[in-house]
Image: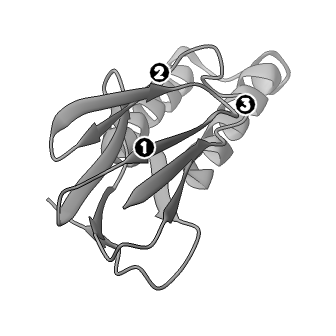
């Protein structure tokens, strides 16, 4: 089975390659807006994208002999929080937050980022009918 992997993560992390693991083993590295085609002989594979501590969901793909198209994107929730955080940082001098308010904002931000480490990227199949599905740990 041929797997075509495309990375469309946009502006965030575009200068660094994302590593794709197959069945828990390092497999390929893919840059932003890059597509790679790889032949797989296993009956089923589990794919997961990662960049340092940030990871994606795990995607189980069963070998049906048909080509499979996979797309890696950033989690839209993570992008929204980045935009909100930078907007708040720009407004801090105007709002006159206290030091305690700023510290609470940072604590909230880092707690959210920590909770998103395993969901920073979204790996999904772009063609239906091959039997792939998300799996939890």
Please, is residue 4 above or below residue 33 in the view?
below
Compare marks 2 and 1 and give the one earlier in the sequence.
1
Using the numbered discs, state the Cα–Cα distance from disc 2 to disc 1 in whole angstroms.
47 Å
Q: Which mark is in front, 1 or 3?
A: 1
Mark 1 neighbour density, 10 Å: few (under 14) some (14–19) many (20 or more):
few
Determine whether, in the image, residue 134 is placed left or right of residue 110: left
Dot 2 and dot 1 residues touching (CB under 8 Å): no
Residue at 28% in and 70% down? 63
Q: Secondary structure at mark 3?
A: helix
Q: Are marks 1 and 3 in contact (CB under 8 Å)?
A: no
Q: Which mark is residue 38?
A: 1
Label 1 vs label 3: CA separation? 43 Å
Q: Where the C terminus falls, by quadrant?
A: bottom left
Identify the residue at horizontal 67%, vertical 23% (top origin): 97
Residue at label 3?
A: 88
Count of numbered labels shown in the rendering: 3
Q: Give x and y (percent) for residue 56.
A: 37, 47
């Amino acid at each position: 089975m041929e797997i075509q992997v495309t990375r469309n993560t946009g502006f965030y992390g575009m200068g660094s390659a994302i590593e794709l693991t197959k069945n828990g083993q390092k497999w390929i590295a893919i840059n932003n807006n890059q597509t790679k085609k790889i032949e797989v002989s296993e009956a089923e594979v589990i794919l997961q994208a990662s960049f340092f501590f940030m990871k994606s969901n795990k995607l189980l793909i069963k070998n049906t002999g048909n080509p499979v198209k996979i797309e890696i994107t950033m989690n839209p929730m993570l992008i929204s929080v980045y935009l909100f955080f930078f907007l708040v940082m720009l407004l801090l001098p105007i709002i006159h937050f206290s030091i305690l308010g700023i510290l609470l904002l940072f604590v909230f931000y880092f707690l959210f980022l920590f909770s998103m480490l395993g969901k920073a990227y979204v790996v999904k199949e772009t063609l239906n009918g091959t039997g792939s599905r998300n799996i939890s740990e």
